[in-house]
Amino acid sequence: MLTQLIIALVPGALALAALLMALEVWVQKEGAVPSQIWDNYWRWYSERAEYLLDRTPVRDYAIKHAGVAVAAGFAAAVIGRDLLLALATIGVATWIPFLLYDQRVQKRREALQQQIDPALQFIANTLQITPNLEDALQLVAENFKAPMAEEAARVVASYRLGQSLEEALQGMAARCNDPFITSMVIALVVGRRTGGNISITLRRIAYATREAVRVELELASKTRGQRNQFYLVVLLYPLGLLALRAVLPDAWQQLTTTVTGKICLAATAACVGAGIYWAQRILSPENL
């Protein structure tokens, strides 16, 4: 009996080993789906971590991200004893870290935008006393609060480590990826190159930026409530399915066991997905 069991297990073990080796090759192959997913994830996290000054390596963050999703799905499976609930929980737990990290980026960007006007006014006043732009940026780093102080300190540190001041400022513009910060950097770079009364130019840009930032922040506050309503509506579909299964098990069985029910379920899921995509396009700042 034991010999027959071993003979039966050996082919299975060899097949499993071959499957794992094939998966490893597939994952490491350039251009494969797992490689593309990892590249996109790495790009998404690296851009935001650089902006947020987050020193957590992308692999460590990905492990924590996956651990949270798996733990939430396991807890839902143990408590609810429902595969659908576990899969839905894994999906939600996978999506929430993306949302929270993007919200951190948006919060820092809004705080930075509100500091552009006083920072430009401060630099303009400082340049009337001393023509050294590095000293003006150092004073910004010392006297302002984060995040403007952090960005100014990074510019000064890059300059002292060997970069030119223009390259350090351009790095700040690329890192922040904000049109108002880019305008500020252009004013500083062009004023430094051409000379003249840069203080007057900075004050004019500060005034224009102040009005533009005010309008953008008001628009963001109005759309934030709409986005929260959108997230609530998105959750209604999976919650409705779970409620249908609990309250009307016969109807749920018809949906999941018959061909007509499966087609109906797939059609409603496709409609919900199309509605989510359409709503995201409408709420995108590019279309406002």
Image (cartoon, rainbow, N blue to C red):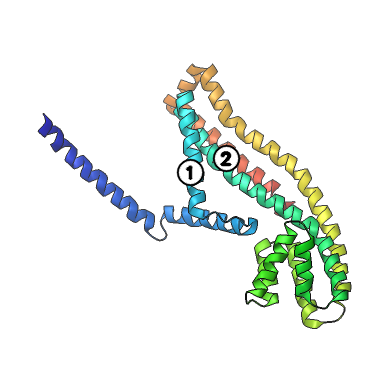
In the picture of the structure, the residue carrying the numbered disc 2 is: 273
Q: Which mark is residue 78?
A: none
Residue under label 1: 66
Judged from the image, the secondary structure of the residue bearing numbered disc 1 is helix
| Residue shown at 71% from the left, 50% from the top | 107
Q: Residue furthest front?
A: 142
Local crowd size for mark 1, using a 10 Å CA cut-off: few (<14), some (14–19), many (≥20): some
Give the residue type at disc 1. Ala
Residue 231 visible, this angle: yes
**Is 167 on the left-hand or right-hand side of 72?**
right
Check the image and report above or below for 230 versus 173. above
Callout 2 secondary element? helix
Looking at the picture, tell me which residue is in the foreground, 24 or 32.
24
**How far across and down, in percent of the image, does residue 13 sit?**
22, 42
Q: Residue at x 80, y 58 (%)?
A: 115
Q: CA distance from mark 2 to mark 1?
A: 24 Å
* Residue 30 higher or lower than 277, as above or below: below
Q: Amino acid at mark 2?
A: Gly
Mark closer to the chain start, 2 or 1? 1
